[in-house]
Amino acid sequence: MATSTQLQQQISEIKNGRTMAALKSEDKKAYYKVKSLSEKLSIAKATEKGQFITKDHLVEYKALIIWILNRKANFNGYLNLKEAMQTMLDKVERKEFVYKTEKGIKGIICDLALAVGLENCEENLRKANGFDWTEGAHDQPLLWSFGQFRLTAIS
């Protein structure tokens, strides 16, 4: 990954003294390239500052995490709360999630809880019913129902 200095240099080269409004009207491709680089720059700066989601953040939002797992990600009781919580902790301890602002922490944790919960439910559903990972929802009504549940949960 490029450093923040390299990204700032790329952005200034593309902008070439132009504002974003001017860039958008003159060269849409360059405008969207600058937007993409700016997003990468903000993530690089947050990473350099060490702004990672931590175990303390999970503890702070524990009640919310449990609520999301039980209410939004639990399909027909297939969720194993303990496993899902452990998976979240493992992912956080690997420093996979960077936050740009303090306000963004809650959203990142909510998205993580939902993703981990749905993944855990699908694993447990497949194990409990002997479904192979190659089986699709077209043959199995239960898998189809889970697919619909997943779509509703993430939308």
Image: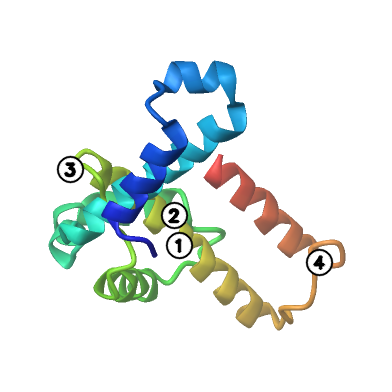
**Amino acid under label 4?**
Gln
The numbered mark at residue 114 is: 2
Which comes before the other along the chain, label 3 or label 1? Answer: 3
Q: Are marks 3 and 4 in contact (CB under 8 Å)?
A: no
Q: Label 4's element?
A: loop
According to the picture, the residue beneath numbered tag 3 turns out to be 102
- Left of 109 or right of it: where is 53? left
Name the quadrant of the N terminus. bottom left
Q: CA–CA distance between discs 2 and 3?
A: 20 Å
**Amino acid under label 3?**
Glu
Q: Are marks 1 and 4 in contact (CB under 8 Å)?
A: no
Which comes before the other along the chain, label 1 or label 4? Answer: 1
Q: CA–CA distance between discs 3 and 1?
A: 24 Å
- Left of 75 or right of it: where is 103? left
- From this view, report whether residue 92 is shown above or below residue 41: below
Q: CA–CA distance between discs 3 and 4?
A: 43 Å
According to the picture, the residue beneath numbered tag 1 turns out to be 117
According to the picture, the residue beneath numbered tag 4 turns out to be 140
Mark 1 burial class by Cα count in 10 Å: few <14, some 14-19, many 20+: many
Q: CA–CA distance between discs 2 and 1?
A: 5 Å
Q: Are marks 2 and 1 in contact (CB under 8 Å)?
A: yes
